[in-house]
Image (tube, coloured by chain):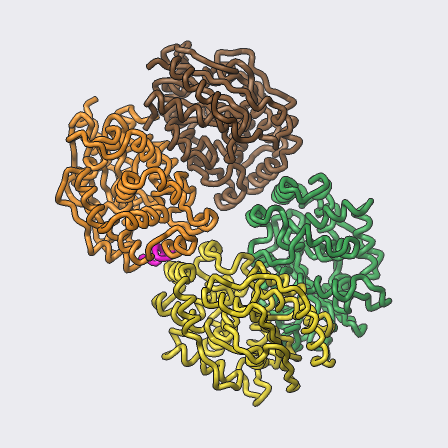
Chain colours: A green, B yellow, C orange, D brown
Amino acid sequence: MNYKEILERVMNNVRAEKSLGKLATYIPELGNIDPYKLGVHLSTVNNLDVGSGDNQEKLSIQSIAKVFSLCLAYKMVGESIWKRVDVEPSGNPFNSLVQLEADNGIPRNPFINAGAIVICDILISHLERPKDAFLSFVKEISDNPELTFCQKIADSEKSIGYRNVALCNFIKSLGNIKNEPEEVLDFYFCLCSLEMSCKELAQAFLFLANGGKKVSDEKEILTKSQTKRINALMQTCGFYDESGEFAFEVGLPGKSGVGGGIVAVFPGNYSIAVWSPKLNAKGNSYKGMMFLEMFTTETEASIF
Amino acid sequence: MNYKEILERVMNNVRAEKSLGKLATYIPELGNIDPYKLGVHLSTVNNLDVGSGDNQEKLSIQSIAKVFSLCLAYKMVGESIWKRVDVEPSGNPFNSLVQLEADNGIPRNPFINAGAIVICDILISHLERPKDAFLSFVKEISDNPELTFCQKIADSEKSIGYRNVALCNFIKSLGNIKNEPEEVLDFYFCLCSLEMSCKELAQAFLFLANGGKKVSDEKEILTKSQTKRINALMQTCGFYDESGEFAFEVGLPGKSGVGGGIVAVFPGNYSIAVWSPKLNAKGNSYKGMMFLEMFTTETEASIF
Amino acid sequence: MNYKEILERVMNNVRAEKSLGKLATYIPELGNIDPYKLGVHLSTVNNLDVGSGDNQEKLSIQSIAKVFSLCLAYKMVGESIWKRVDVEPSGNPFNSLVQLEADNGIPRNPFINAGAIVICDILISHLERPKDAFLSFVKEISDNPELTFCQKIADSEKSIGYRNVALCNFIKSLGNIKNEPEEVLDFYFCLCSLEMSCKELAQAFLFLANGGKKVSDEKEILTKSQTKRINALMQTCGFYDESGEFAFEVGLPGKSGVGGGIVAVFPGNYSIAVWSPKLNAKGNSYKGMMFLEMFTTETEASIF
Amino acid sequence: MNYKEILERVMNNVRAEKSLGKLATYIPELGNIDPYKLGVHLSTVNNLDVGSGDNQEKLSIQSIAKVFSLCLAYKMVGESIWKRVDVEPSGNPFNSLVQLEADNGIPRNPFINAGAIVICDILISHLERPKDAFLSFVKEISDNPELTFCQKIADSEKSIGYRNVALCNFIKSLGNIKNEPEEVLDFYFCLCSLEMSCKELAQAFLFLANGGKKVSDEKEILTKSQTKRINALMQTCGFYDESGEFAFEVGLPGKSGVGGGIVAVFPGNYSIAVWSPKLNAKGNSYKGMMFLEMFTTETEASIF
């Protein structure tokens, strides 16, 4: 399979398409991004590394960070984290409070906001300096010591984060947050503000395509079984209430963020990151979805 | 991979486990089944065929039939069926009316009862004798002319099917059923009553592991792309509100029925059917889930 | 208080107002009614009887019939009917299935469709010829032997009554309907089709303003305590999800129907019926609401 | 009507009944109250004033304060407050976030927590020193300069008030809170902590039985029409999801609080306050409900 050639061809096709969708203006700072950015980067378990467009420019990874925090918590705490958060698709918009009430404070999965906030709470309970530890973890899995949070983005999200404040206090009232909501949210907004390029994202996710081991140095980040489970979770829950659509169209586990990034993983083969800031009605990158659908069609390969 | 050996070993382990769960007594006739039946059958794309236990005994396939009716409708009508039924996990118990109201009569996916009923309505609109056509289709994909519906089971389900009557009339009131509810439900109860053995089920699902073509004669049942989409749907929606759990534990697309059957597909490799009548709290075969989890663990292979 | 003078003055004001709202076209036959009909009739416990406009013309009383069926069931069965139906406002649109699921088949109150259907089921269980018995009861309380059902309206509602079929089968599946849904619905559609004039309606409701006794012959229909409870129920639940608004604007217990009729009761004083077929967005007569608001404002008397 | 005699007789009966229900321990400080307190006080528009038991002892009025804040906001702002809060029964538990999401941040009525919080927000926007102004208003309507908030109770409720924090931030995210959530909640917890005796409560509510004018000095607090509306709201919404039951059993407009107090109003006749700290399953005083039911039964007089 000549991935490089296909990637370039698909990139040209996607570039030529009309750029529909809208910027995620609900976070004021994200509204300032150039909406026409477009980048893609692919890393294979056989050490192939190819990118195109704005693949080396930093984007705000937002919800993609939820995969990192989940992996770190899973690695540290093990299977008992599933007592605090479930593994089922939510079937509801990503920030719904309704379902949480019915489920007695146990979020449906770790990728909806409620679940990611509970994972933050778990990390705070187990780590002395959670922000540093989180950053170190992402630096390690991406072999990249240059990553930083963006305080401006974190502050911007905090300034209008009333719904997340509501969510966190609501879960606290239902007994599934152990620390103070303010501390939990500060950590949550911070990790969503992490900035990475498509290249860095593809490299950071590559261990999930490699049975849990880093490709560069064979170091085990998660066990084979844990890796399979993270991939299964991304497949069923990674795209809010468009998760079924993504499985249906693309056929790979993945995770999106409102910054316009999407990362997908083909177990045993590759990880791939795309960036295009304009989002579709369900909050996922419009051209990012399009790129991945075309790419798996052209390569004639998906997990299904 | 010695599938035969692993299958026998896992079968012995599962047989030794305590048989938890309960029969699906809500359909009176299903309550008469021997709860200790246990069978499994595996068919590979390389013509391997191995079974164990009660793998040649007929079971009531119930909701597994929804995969057959969906494939037939998809084959006949094409992509336009997705205007009548969505492809997202429901996140709610399998027969919830709540979500349907919010979604204006478009069922979340074709595997919840609401969605399967709409698929029945589509088939009735396109077929002169839908029951015969459905049976012919399943006979064809399983290379087996001996299949029959069980009128007794269909009648039993109809006699207490008030909730499905509610569901069908509710969708009709929302405009997404075109024929008379009575006719649609008669077809629906009929196809759920189809009886097949594990061996027959594994063989009938094998084309989904083979890119849409039958293994026996290479005949194309669905295109490659359609096949991928059916598999993706089974992965995200095949197990009611335990679909995430099944992806997480087993890692294969599949479909369960309240008769205690489960079929799973490993694209490019095999299809497998298990039968054990006692169900867990979410309505899926207790030992069937256990068998498949152990089997993918032992074979160290899943789509993730 | 010169009721006659006030009634005429208010009538003139309402007649002069623009006729907003829409006919209830979802029942085909109701769509054929002259939308500009306007009638009112007031009967007092002191034998005053005054009317104006189309007050002697028959209208389809629709949901107003639910008060009659409730009174009859209450009279026959006593307090035990509250085990089958609750007495709380629903806070949801009148035909919502959502709440019913949460409440395990116990409808919130006897005036939403679900509750009225359960009351029909109770009457069928206790009466040999429920339609005749119901009609006799309304003839008795209104001192009027000339009342009839309208088969054409009943058939019209039945022909499109999929949602009520859904509702009744759903409650049956939850265990709170004892007879066959078809029989229950046939009775339900029949009693909604009763035709009465404003004059007949005001007279039929007068015992509820008179402590449960008919004014004409002092015969006790309901006890004082039962009468108080029926009035309380009309106050909190008589106008679907506009019940609060009606209490707020008009301040009298009452009941509306989609035929455009409204009856209200001022305990110790009078009953009053208004008819104007065009409905507001919540399904209550637009000019009927307006008339009653003006009338209680002009008379400076309500229960509050 | 010899109110004094009936009141004493009912008091004796209620005192003899078993004291079921539970203290509202979710607010830690309220858990310290003597659960066997029992007091009642009645004030009539004819200057009769009778009490019994612990009628002169202070209780934490909690949600009863919502009537005072609503009256003050209504008096100051007029009908436009109904753009910010609706007048319909909620049909859901008092602190449900579900409905609020469906209603786009407009609370169903001013007596559920969400609605009371919005009323607090309105008062803050219109008053320079809202706490002082609120206290002055209650002092005025009760002719009692000795009222105070209880800081200990306010702090206690704040310390565990995560759900109200969630509620307020959620409404803010939906655009219906104008000030900062922290300030709004501080005011809200403060006014709920007001302490008054049954005697003081009965006197403070008496103007609502007197067409909006104080009985002592004929000063108009609210207009006749406004008074009618407040009473209607108490009738349909004053007892959370037991409002229908209260109308049904007691038949008077009223308001309860988790401190075990209930105040009811008989327009044109009297106001009455009862106190018994143990609450029924729906959060209303067990013996308080019982007292009022017996009292209206014995006096054979209610608004219905």
Q: Is residue D117 magenta?
A: no
Q: Is residue C162 magenta?
A: yes
Left or right: where D18 falls relative to A88: left
Left or right: where B54 falls relative to C49: right
- Residue at 67 percent across and 62 percent down: it is A234
Q: Residue furthest right?
A: A217
Where is residue A18? Give x, y as percent: 57, 66
Left or right: where A217 falls relative to D13: right
Quadrant of the frame with the C terminus of chain C: top left
Task: Judge by depth and name the residue closer to the eye, B15 or D179.
Answer: B15
- Residue at 25 percent across and 48 percent down: it is C127
**Quadrant location of residue A42?**
bottom right
Where is residue B76? Give x, y as percent: 46, 78
Task: Judge by depth and name the residue closer to the eye, A127 or B50.
Answer: B50
Q: Is residue B253 above or below residue A71?
A: below
Left or right: where C263 falls relative to C86: left
Task: Judge by depth and name the residue closer to the eye, B157 or A256.
Answer: B157
**Quadrant location of residue C272?**
top left
Q: Is residue C242 above or below residue D124?
A: below
Prevailing secondary structure of the magenta residues: helix
Q: Is residue A288 above or below residue D265?
A: below
- Residue at 64 percent across and 44 percent down: it is A171
Q: Is residue D76 visible?
A: no
Task: Judge by depth and name the residue closer to the eye, B18 or B195.
Answer: B18
Q: Which region shows up in magenta?
A: C161-166
Where is residue B1? Give x, y as percent: 74, 80
Q: Is residue D209 above or below residue A237?
A: above
Quadrant of the frame with the N terminus of chain C: top left
Where is residue D37? Give x, y as percent: 54, 20
**Quadrant location of residue A169?**
top right
